[in-house]
Amino acid sequence: MLRNLSIKNYALIDTLQVDFENGLNIITGETGAGKSILLGGLSLVLGNRADLSSIKEKEKKCVIEATFNISEYSLQSFFEAEDLDYETTTIIRREILPSGKSRAFINDTPVTLTVLSSLGARLVDIHSQHQTLQLTDNSYQFKIIDAVAGNDEILKSYKKILSSYYKAKKELQKLIDFQQEANKEHDYNTFLLNELKEADLKAGMLEELETTYEKLNNVEEIGEKLVYAAQLLNEEQIGLISNMAELKTTLGKLTPYGKQYELLYNRINSVLIEVDDAAGEIENLRESLDVDPKTLEQVSSRLQQIYALQKKHNVLDIQELLEIQNNLGLRVAKTENLETEIKEAQLKVLDIEKELDVLADNIHKKRKKVIPDLTGYLENVLQTLGMQNAQFEINVNGINSYLANGKDDLQFLFSANKGTSFEELKKVASGGELSRIMLTIKSLLARHTKLPTIMFDEIDTGVSGEVSNKMGDIMKQMSENMQVFTITHLPQVAAKGDVHYKVYKIDDEDKTSTNLVRLNKEERLREIAEMLGGKDISTSALEHAKQLLN
């Protein structure tokens, strides 16, 4: 419920600070006193868009703040989803700066206008004659019948599964689209994959093949160099081994003359052993050389095959080709398995449809069941509001499409007079009739759901006498379970309030201001008497006002 409203520097309001109570809150005032300004300020703090013209003194900022008790509204999940601090006493603030920029805060946390508006819709329902058009909206009509039918929980389940259904349908379509594209490329991808598989690629094989090719392609030159190297080592007169053997013998004769000669001898001996071993290795290599044109041709062919694949796929090494081969393998395999995946996805969609059908059927049956009680209630209440011949015809027909709230088509038809055909509300109901129908609907919803604070903005315009008295009774009854505000010009309605506020205008020498004051018992009596007979309050008007208040 709305506990407090503070407005500074807005339109004709300098500073306004007012506390509100539960029950039926009445707001009255002369035409032009500023009741619409009060509503405008409240609408701003609930998320309506603002402009610079809203600021009274352009060089100062406009600040509107509202305090709500939200303990019974089950809004914890909303605050959690928006990453806001949840407080049972929640403060909403809206600031409009002289620059025209607007800022919004929920419990001192900055929020976007979208978030503020979303919360505001959960806290206050401002209803004016213009908003009676909501009655003609099909989704609102579903809201009415579902509230009476008690479909809230089953609709939550339906919407949750419907979300899974849309997701499953989307996944199925993605598979179908992918299959269509993949089929175009399948043959080419298969050809590329087989080409890579036939190459029998392995990591490191390119380097091995290139080494083998160089060896086979240069076997004669290698042989010549090895023969020459062997000659340098093994020639009898000038060979390195022969000379080193003679050097070893010479140094061996010096070993008796000192340790240093012995060490030198040992070093030369070690070198001779190493050189001799190298000579044996050279000989082995020379003997193993084999001129093999066939193998050379095979190696050359393999290299050309790999080089061609590298060029084709624009890569530099075997590893990249192997990665391409792996990816092609996955794509080809997926394409070949798509038919199975699509069938599985189709079965999943069908299973979800069965779940949705069961829920939608239950929703449909519950809607059909409450139609007689719903039409009976509306018609009975409207008779007390001066619409003796009002009749409703509500038709709920099943359809094959999955809608956001089931699988039904809803016709909410109305006839105001005897002998007239049933038509859609927007075609046959006048503005005054729509106001009375909306009040009746709101009173019905108050019985079945936890409505937020509701504010009726002159919903009783165009009615008088006993009808206005009955409208006041309905609002009074609603206020037993919720906070109700009504802006009214009718004394019959005003007298039924638990608390009475008056909007008034003050004219100074250089400015006009609007204010709001809570009336005490005596002030309230005079206000209602003035509503009955004008500013010159007569004794009869005062007596009549007392009767209304009693």
Image (spheres, grey):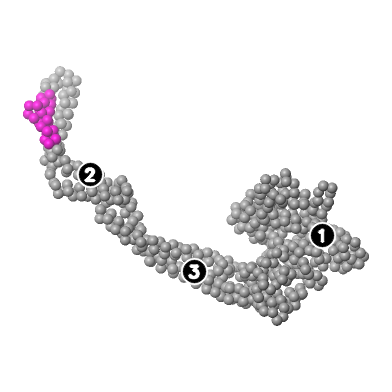
Residue linked to disc 1 = 30
Decide if residue 257 is on the left or right side of residue 406: left
Tell me which secondary structure the magenta stretch mostly adopts: helix
Residue linked to disc 3 = 352
Q: Residue at x 53, y 66 (%)?
A: 162
Residue that protrudes farthest toward the top in the picture = 257
Q: Is residue 87 visible?
A: no
Residue that protrudes farthest toward the left in the picture = 236
Decide if residue 149 is on the left or right side of residue 497: left
Q: Counting residues from the N terminus, which is met first, the one under dot 1 or under dot 2?
A: 1
In the image, which is nearer the foreground, mark 3 or mark 2? 2
Q: Counting residues from the N terminus, which is met first, the one under dot 3 or under dot 2?
A: 2
Q: Amino acid at mark 2?
A: Glu
Q: Counting residues from the N terminus, which is met first, the one under dot 3 or under dot 1?
A: 1
Residue 210 is labelled as 2
Front-lying residue, 512 or 395: 512
Q: Is residue 262 visible?
A: yes
Q: Which residues are magenta?
A: 224-248
Decide if residue 49 is on the left or right side of residue 521: left
In the image, which is nearer the foreground, mark 1 or mark 2? 1
Give the alpha-carbon distance from disc 3 to disc 2, as whole Å: 60 Å
